[in-house]
Image (tube, grey):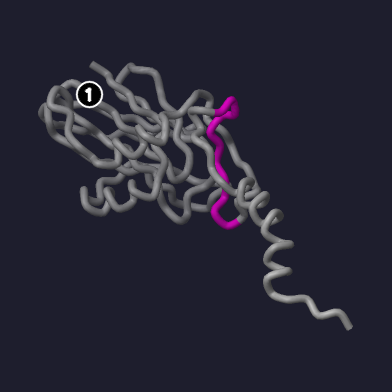
Amino acid sequence: MVKIGRRTVVAALLPAVTTLSGCATSKDASEEDDPFCYRSKLEPYIKGPCLAGPVPSQAMDSAAKRFEADPGFLTVFVVRQGWADGAVVVRVRAASHPAVETLPDTLVRLRLRPGAHVLALEFRDQTDEIGVRGEAGQVRFVRLLSFGLSWRGRYRWTDEGAESLRRRAAKTRLVADVVLG
């Protein structure tokens, strides 16, 4: 019987482990040609729907998650994060401006003129609206909440409080950073 030492096994496996770990790293979606797509947390090899356009860089994602106010705008963070969210695209629109797309576990930062605004969500045949009001230099949070079964899901707006939504937003990826002046 041949006896193999622990160092020999580790040395033999090291190149394979290094190669496989390279496959598991996440690249910055804004630096790739591929679109940003949903990947299941339970089965990460299952790819879901993708967003139509590029997403902000990882550096912008980190900067946005400091949740700092912009002195010239009302900053609104749209948080889409929850355990029962379905792998579908939900669009968010501020007034008559073009819609931005969201996926589960994503974040949108909107910088709006001070005052009152109406945000609308669009999903399949449903829409829902929420009013947001604020002054320049203020930060507001709203959440896209899914309810019902994932294949027949429904969405609505909710405002569960800034601290709760900050914690949820920390678990997301910034997919749109929009200035609507």
Q: Tell me the residue at 40%/23% (across/down).
A: 99
Q: Is residue 172 magenta?
A: no
Q: Three-letter amino acid code at disc 1? A: Leu
Q: Position of 76 compared to 13: left or right?
A: left
Residue 167 image position (x, y, % from top left): 30, 53
Residue 31 image position (x, y, % from top left): 51, 28
Quarter of the image where the C terminus is located? top left
Depth check: 74 or 151 in front?
Answer: 74
Q: Tell me the residue at 41%/29% (across/down).
A: 56
Residue 38 image position (x, y, % from top left): 55, 41
Is disc 1 placed on a helix, strand or loop? strand
- Please identify the residue farthest to the bottom as the structure is shown: 1
Quarter of the image where the N terminus is located? bottom right
**Dot 1 surroundings within 10 Å: few (below 14), some, or many (20 or more)?**
many
Q: Quadrant of residue 137?
A: top left
Q: Is residue 37 magenta?
A: yes
Depth check: 112 or 118 in front?
Answer: 112
Q: Which residues are magenta?
A: 32-42
Q: How many marks?
A: 1
Tell me if residue 163 comes above or below residue 31 in the rendering: below
- Please identify the residue farthest to the right as the structure is shown: 1
Q: Tell me the residue at 66%/51% (across/down).
A: 20
Q: Tell me the residue at 69%/74% (across/down).
A: 6
Say which residue label 1 marks: 112
